[in-house]
Image: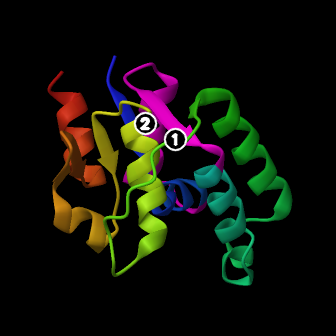
Amino acid sequence: MLRVLLDTNVLISALISKGKPRTLLRQAYKNKFMLILSIEILNEFINVASREYFQEYVDEREIAEFTRALASLAHFIIIKSNFEVIKEDPDNDIVLRTAYDGKAEYIVTGDKHLLALKEFRELKIITIGEMLELLQNK
């Protein structure tokens, strides 16, 4: 089974809208891929989702339910690596470390710094649309 990390921006989009991000997350529920996460990424998701900006889209109950669903679905990784790659946005290194330590094959993101890498230590870094297309062709 494919091992895939969904970046925080993809998870937030899946939470607040019914488009491609949510469609992609549903594929994990259908066992089309294994969702790889770390507690650090889950905590970042909760922090971002709880910001005032998102209150017009979701309430605390919806965030809590979504978080519980993610926690039960995901395969959690303990981050052991400590490399620094993305100088412009060091917070993205957590994504790379989680994916690398979790032996993910893909990182799915909308983040321009991660997408600019295209690949990192055999990890492919792709968009939501590219991942949906890949899953459709499997």
Residue found 18% across the figure and 62% down from its top: 117
C-alpha gap between disc 1 and disc 2: 7 Å
Q: Which of 91 and 127 is in front in this view?
A: 91
Q: What element carries label 2?
A: helix
Residue found 24% across the figure and 30% down from its top: 135
| Label pair 1/2, CB-CB below 8 angstroms | yes
Q: Position of residue 10 (x, y in %)?
A: 45, 57
Identify the residue at the far right of this view.
61
Q: Position of residue 81 (x, y in %)?
A: 45, 45
Q: Which of 98 and 126 is in front in this view?
A: 98
Mark 2 nearby-residue class (10 Å; few <14, some 14–19, many ≥20): some
Mark 1 nearby-residue class (10 Å; few <14, some 14–19, many ≥20): few
Boundaries of the magenta span: 16-39
Residue found 47% across the figure and 63% down from its top: 9
Q: Quadrant of residue 49?
A: bottom right
Q: Which amino acid does label 1 sit on?
A: Lys
Comes first in the chain, label 1 or label 2? 1
From the image, which quarter does the C terminus lie in?
A: top left
Q: Position of residue 62 (x, y in %)?
A: 77, 54
Is residue 26 one of those drawn in magenta?
A: yes
Vertical relation: 105 (above or below) 123 = above
Which disc number belongs to residue 80?
A: 1
Which disc number belongs to residue 106?
A: none
Q: Disc 2 marks which residue?
A: 101
